[in-house]
Image (cartoon, rainbow, N blue to C red):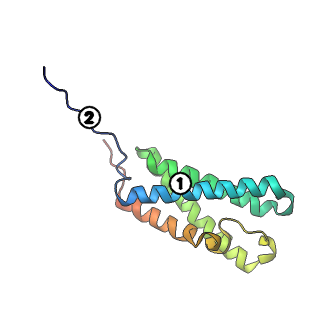
Amino acid sequence: MSEQPVPAPVRSPRTPGVGRVLVVVYAILALAATGRSFSQIVRSFDEAPLAYTLSAVAAIVYIVATVALILPGRSAYRLAWVTIVFELVGVIVVGTLSLVVPEHFQHATVWSVYGQGYLFVPLVLPVLGMWWLARHPERTA
């Protein structure tokens, strides 16, 4: 009776080591942004619809980026790039607008003042995400 070898688990090539930490941070930020936006929208959407909608957009971006970083394949790799670049642009635009025209951002969003309410993680995370994606490109089979 011969023993059959146990197949190794299939993993995305982008998630070993530091990539796992990146995915975990994205997942935590996705949960935090989702909770914040849900709470803001349910409690007082009429007070600051722009700010609370931006928080919901940020939550969606973090969820999609997390999933795209986990999944293998070219489509997931491209989606990760798109969402992470969108995230960086969003943080820079909303962060700048929240400083230049603060009257439009009296209620904070995830990306207000470049993510200050989240210890600037929203500003640093997309830069790290793009660095990680550039160092771990999707390989064609």
Please report the residue visible at 55 percent of the width from the left and 69 percent of the height from the top: 121
Q: Position of residue 56 (x, y in %)?
A: 69, 55
Residue positioned most to the top: 1
Q: Position of residue 89 (x, y in %)?
A: 59, 66
| Corner quadrant of residue 37 | bottom right
Residue type beneath disc 1: Ala
Please report the residue visible at 37 percent of the width from the left and 61 percent of the height from the top: 18
Q: Nearer the viewer, residue 11 or 103?
A: 11
Could you tell me if residue 83 is visible in this image?
no
Do tag 1 and tag 2 residues touch (Cβ < 8 Å)? no
Which mark identifies residue 27? 1
Q: Position of residue 42 (x, y in %)?
A: 80, 52
Which mark identifies residue 7? 2
Q: Position of residue 134 (x, y in %)?
A: 39, 61
Task: Locate the C terminus and report the quarter of the image it occupies.
Answer: top left
Calculate the distance from the C-alpha at mark 1 to the C-alpha at mark 2: 28 Å
Label 1: which secondary element: helix
